[in-house]
Amino acid sequence: MKNNLKVHRAIKDITQAELAEEINVSRQTINAMEKGKYVPSTVLALKLARFFEKPVEELFILEEED
Amino acid sequence: MKNNLKVHRAIKDITQAELAEEINVSRQTINAMEKGKYVPSTVLALKLARFFEKPVEELFILEEED
DNA sequence: ACTAAAAGTCAAGTTTATTTTACTTTAAGT
DNA sequence: ACTTAAAGTAAAATAAACTTGACTTTTAGT
């Protein structure tokens, strides 16, 4: 699974730290997510979708290997 | 976070075991999810959304305490 | 009432998400 | 070149997802 967090964060022009605070996770969690280091929980995905005002499917995209 | 898996599974008229096989998780994982015992990963949510042909947001709903 | 399928549950184990602390690197401004 | 904010990274610890196997309960059919 890949994601567009970095892009949408750039559009809103906020830092990883700011996003982390909005969503209530650590900055490293945002960073690791953006770098594709792990798969977030559905709660996190929904919170990000709500924050960016985009459907979950637009932020997170399934890949073959999933 | 709550979910409507049981309803959508009923609409498609399939068992927990069948859904589990479709999605490639254990039957207990489906059962525990339906009973709200834990929050699934985003990959799982996306797979379920794809299977049920519904947006993630329609299957999984954020609550206050999230 | 009997049976069988489906659903529910539980404990133990493995894997993975997430946090915390802390350090290094990159980018941008002055 | 210097400074500072932001991003990247990493190790250790904790919490949570998910599996496996086994058992109990519910549901529906006959």
Image (tube, coloured by chain):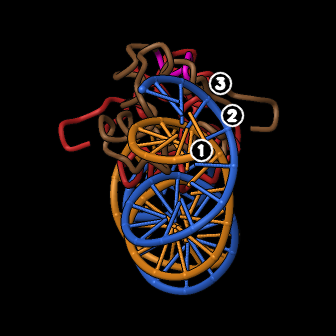
Chain colours: A brown, B red, C blue, D orange
Circle 2 residues within 10 Å: few <14, some 14–19, many ≥20: some
The answer to whether residue B3 is left or right of residue B54 is left
Nearer-N-terminus badge (2/3): 2
What's under tag 3, amino acid-wise?
Ile
Rendering coords of residue D23 (x, y %): 50, 78
- The answer to if A12 sits in the magenta stretch is no
> Can residue A40 be seen in this snapshot?
yes
Looking at the rendered structure, the secondary structure element under dot 2 is loop
Highlighted range, magenta: A55-59
Judging by the rendered image, the residue that carries numbered circle 3 is A61
Share a chain, discs 3 and 1? yes
Residue A56 belongs to the span the image colors magenta: yes
Q: Is residue B7 left or right of residue B45?
A: left
Q: Are marks 2 and 3 in contact (CB under 8 Å)?
A: yes
Q: Which residue lies most toward the right here? A: A64
Instruction: Decide: few, some or many residues near mark 3? Use Cα within 10 Å; few <14, some 14-19, many ≥20.
Output: some
Pick whichever, C5 or A2, lies toward us. A2
Given the image, what chain letter belongs to the residue carrying mark 2?
A
Mark 1 vs 2: CB contact within 8 A: yes
Position in image of residue B60 (x %, y %): 39, 30
